[in-house]
Image: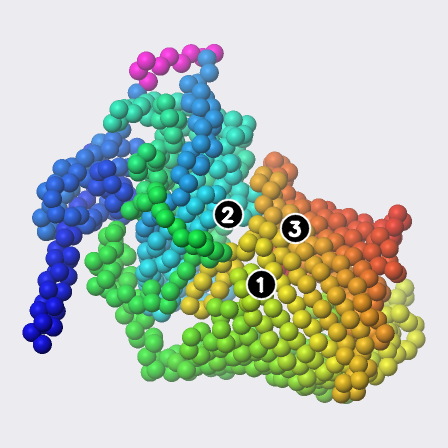
Amino acid sequence: MNKIFLVLMLGLLYAQQLTAQQIKISGTIKDNQGTPVSFASVYVKETSKGTSANIDGNYVIMVDPGQHTLLYKAIGFKPTERRIDPVAGLRQDVVMETESYTLEGVTITADAEDPAYEIIRQAIKRRKIHLEEVDAYSCDVYIKGLQKLVGAPKKFFGRDIQKTLDLDTNRKGILYLSESQSTYNYQQPDKIHEEMISSKIAGRNNAFSFNKASDLNINFYNNMLLENVLSSRGFVSPLADNALFYYNYKFLGMSNSNGETINKIQVIPRREHDPVFRGIMYITDDSWRLLGAELYLTKNTGVNLIDTLNIKQQYIKVDNAYMPSNVNFQFNGNVMGFKFEGYYLGVYTNYNLEPNFPKGFFTGELLKVPATVNKKDSTYWANNRPIPLTPEERADYIRKDRIEQLKVSKRYLDSLERSVNKFSLSRLLLAGHSINNRYDKRYLKLDPVLKSMFYNTVEGFGINYGLTYLQELQGYRSYTIRPELRYGLASKTLTANLNGTYIYNPAKKASINFGVGSGVYDLNRYGTMTMLSNSLNNLLFERNFMKLYRKSFLNAGTSKELFTGLQGNINLEYSENRFLQNNTRFRFFEYSDRSFTSNNPFSPEVETPLFPDYKALTAQATLTYNIGRRFITRPEGKFYQESKYPEVQLSYRRGIKNVFGSDADYDLLNLEISQERIGEGLWGFSSFMISAGKFLNDKTVYYPDRKHFRGNNSLTTLPNLRKFQFLDFYEYSTDQQYLEAHFEQNFAGLIMNKLPVIRKLKLEELVGVNFLTQPDKKNYKEYYFGLQRLIFRATYGFAYDGNKKVQHGFRISYGF
């Protein structure tokens, strides 16, 4: 017993000693005018242990006992050193002097080249050397993100903005405040693994921050930056191989620091609206290395949603290399009267440039967020937060955390639900009605009534109405159940079905699903158009493009990630299928040059059955593999990121004859390769899809079981890379072999950005080609070009059957 007591006492003494080893030093960093120096770096000299000041210039750093030299650095200021012998609670305020950059010894004449150009040429010459000089490293990263409104309209779509967004009386306030700490590991050329240690979001104690160090890891030694982030094209680095084509440079002077000559270079766009930066770079003589940058983007460069993005980057010497110590993204903008600003700050410390990564350390996992990272209490953050909170941030945490504690109580949630769940007929008609129980994590959503109404020549006026019930379970598991009823006045037919999904392992994207009942479905299994679009075409233009059939079914399936990047799906269905006929010819307007066609797309004048009533037992298996796909692992599941490699999908579908009376007898094998948004730098991005398949057995293939294609007969459509512009919805579905290909290039404003006035619309040019060949439609081709802005696009195209032009015209699409 005495031995146990002795061991415990020694352990407590050792823990106390470890705690005592760290001493807190704090202070404020200001310039000669008494203005705070925001986000200045503070490091223990000759180490990579450090921190950053906050936006008010306040800093805190923990150091070991003994004498140290603190190094204070900020862009545009002379590095400042302070020798300290720390004691608990020591305050070290610092005044930093503005760096003086002189032109002594430099002669610039009117006809001579600015000295900046030779400095830039030398830096570009060594660009790749500096980009690859550190083969691997690990470090600690602290990230803080803040977004706030600084102005907003009083009301938006009839809603009080102050109450809705929890703002002050001036409609200002913090919308989002988060902090996180991570360990970050990197290996050339692009291997990354990050693990979050702690996470905090104001007012959301059970949430996990989306902070990711790799999002802040901007490297100006790369030719292109921020592709598919703020713009589809990305932005040319001032140190890119072709930078001299896009930039002018101006030498602003030089200074000496620690024996190094540092050149201050102004970066100036050659053309106002090119995708380029503006600002200042600091480059050393001899090594021609970037030591700091303060560069910014404006809305003239094509950035989306924001007006200005300012990027400040500082470096610290680690061994014989220079590594980022502080990266700061500050932004502002105005969208529909909502004025916002904010920043994301990353502080990199404790570098190790010779890490010993074990074999298999780097996988497709970019970021791992353990379930415990948001469990750290206020004491932990008070002792481990490297950057002090501002009074505004501290007040926001206190207020929102207090409200959060209230919000998770059953009494509050019951009160909230009584208000939110209050029935409104107008809401039910337009947006649907929700009945939520957040305390028990049960949610019921009723479909909007108006969106559920339809008209077609088979069923007449009708309604397809459903509701969705969601139950969230522990471990981020959940199940969803959806019953649905459909009734047509002209056909006097009622169908009903029930579908459900159970997600039992979010980390493995694992689920099971089932369905039972009956319904009326499009003959093309991919669908042709929305119910609303078909209804409008029927009633207003006397065009009944959509053709329908009835199916009664029972199905079950499962899906699971077999290993990283490989998803497996299996589905089994038994169905009874019946062809339908038109039952009404009602329309609002009658046209002399057109009339409704029959429900048989191959017999438009006569209502003849396309297929007999039949039963089918079908089994389908699909393997989808994304080469080198990366992902983020969070407690609520796995989130895949865009891949730079194609996705390959292999599927097999079989009609099983004579089981439960099944008439279907076929085998369909299909292989598809696709990739979307392939970055092409200043040329925008491209996307492609190639699909080939064959019915290995085609003894009994009824029309609904054929291989269908995503055709289009309408002026308006939904955007889809796999969709043809002019191909008939139904005519060329096949039970033989086929080859299908699609390619689209989006130039992301390459041309439109050069046209005055028009460039303000931020239109993106696109061109594309579609191809199909099968026994009944050989070498069908489509070519199109057009413009796109956000979710809207307009194109003009031409269709060729072999070498014969068969159709041309406009197409308008909207949506995602």
Q: Is residue 757 visible?
A: no
The foreground one among 215 and 550 is 215
Q: Helix, strand, or loop for circle 2?
A: loop
Q: Residue 752: x, y in percent?
A: 63, 40
Residue 221 x, y percent position in the rendering: 45, 35
Residue, disc 2:
230
Q: Given contact means CB atoms under 8 Å apart, are the residues at marks 1 and 3 in contact?
A: no
Front residue of this view, candidates 357 and 589 = 357
Secondary structure beneath dot 3 equals strand
What residue is at 30 percent from the left and 36 percent from the top? 319
Q: Residue at x 76, y 59 (%)?
A: 692
Q: Is residue 160 above or below residue 340?
A: below
Residue 97 visible somewhere in the drawing: yes
Q: Vertical placement of 306 versus 753: above or below?
A: below
Q: CA distance from mark 2 to mark 1?
A: 30 Å
Q: Which residues are magenta?
A: 103-111
Where residue 271 appears, x then y in whole percent? 54, 30
Left or right: 700, with 746 as reference point: right
The crowding category of the residue bearing disc 1, from other C-alpha atoms within 10 Å (few below 14, some 14 to 19, many at least 20), is some
Q: Residue at x 43, y 57 (%)?
A: 367
Rendering coords of residue 79 (x, y %): 24, 33
